[in-house]
Image (tube, grey):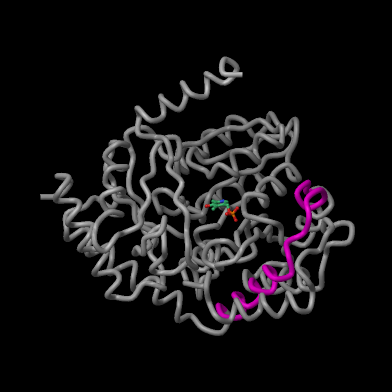
Amino acid sequence: MADKFSWISEEFANLEKQGLRTAIRTIGSPCGAWMVVDGKKVLNFCTNNYLGLANHERLKASAQQAVGVWGVGPAAVRSIAGTLELHRQLEERLARFKGVEDALYVQSGFCANQAAIPAMVGKGDVIFTDRLNHASIIDGCRLSSATIMVYEHCDVTDAERVITENVGKFRRALLITDGVFSMDGDVAPLDQLFELCERHGVMTMVDDAHGEGVLGHGGRGIVDHFGLNGKFDLEIGTLSKAFGVMGGVIAGHKLVVDWVRQKARPFLFSSAVTAADTAACLAAVDLLEQSTELVEKLWENTRYFKEGMRQAGFDTGVSITPITPIMLGDATLAQQFSRRLFESTPGVFAMPIGFPTVPQGKARIRAMISAAHSREDLDTGLEVFAKVGRELGVIG
Ligand SMILES: *Cc1c(COP(=O)(O)O)cnc(C)c1O
């Protein structure tokens, strides 16, 4: 036995030497500005709870009510006996929210990419994909058996070169980009990519996991931000970030979504999302449609926190969204920084991010801003960051 798995011990030793072994923390309270983490109450800058909906009274009430009405599990895949009226309601509401014809609700954003990409392209087809696309896009591309061609990050000129040189050699072509890139917080040049794909007859897909509830009018997402409503062929989203719940969505033209419904393996072979989650998502859409207040608060908090970090002397990278990287370079330093933040009084919870999530030498702390943070929370966060930054010689 020992011999058979010695390679794992060696790999672990390697990871530890490079500061890349992830310690997984355990949460002991609901998701919010402050959370109990490994038994300690700390100020939270780690979660994707952009609008503070993860523990929102209205979402919780909807989920609780749904359990009473529907029970806890559908006990079937969507295509057999798992499609609840609630699922269809949510899909219609999400489609309307995004200004598209139809939407399909699946178990997660990760699943949405596994579902959509292999339904659209296969052997003999080509995918043009941004170098920094999310892991779930990369895996979806691999699952599809299509030829994968990478263009440089957010580089329209390079995308055009790759498309022009190759598009004629394949049956069908699909361009896929993240909307907001989750590690850097920068945004894809969606208008230019769209125009380029239109000219070359390339199908278009954007994954808006970090844009929904954040960008666009009242959080309608990156496509709305660029005024391209209804034009992208496939919009992938998640209900697990700004929406505060769980699940993924594939939205777009009715014809396309109908096709995905026939072909998507996570839809056909993995059970449906629970009624409670679906009802909570419906409440989230209600909230977003009724008021833009939370989205505005998110942006106000984002501007305040970033300005404070810059004034303290930190390098916050190229982000133009609430994702706030604090660039440190060395992975060991990033781990040390995160540990010191956590051990401070009060403790601050912000995760170090290193290879392979970001390239070697680009390690960072990533601070996620939320509408759940009060001004006082942000001031506390800024103070602790500056204290640790000075102690570790990151800022003067
Ligand atoms: C977070 C994320 C996902 C995964 O969403 P889940 O709902 O958590 O599975 C997919 N794509 C992108 C771009 C993401 O940032």
Residue lying furthest top in this view? 3
Residue 358 lies left or right of residue 252; in this view the side is: left
Residue 354 lies left or right of residue 120; in this view the side is: left
Q: Nearer the viewer, residue 53 or 35?
A: 35
**Residue at coordinates 41% horizontally, 63% vertically from top-left?**
36
Quadrant hosting residue 361: top left
Viewer can see residue 137? yes
| Image quarter hosting the N terminus | top right
Residue lying furthest right in this view? 80
Q: Nearer the viewer, residue 224 or 38?
A: 38
Q: Is residue 278 above or below residue 233?
A: below
What is the magenta range?
Answer: 264-288
Percent across and percent down for residue 306 are 28, 62
Residue 364 lies left or right of residue 28; in this view the side is: left
Residue 69 lies left or right of residue 35; in this view the side is: right
Residue lying furthest bottom in this view? 290
Percent across and percent down for residue 375 are 29, 75
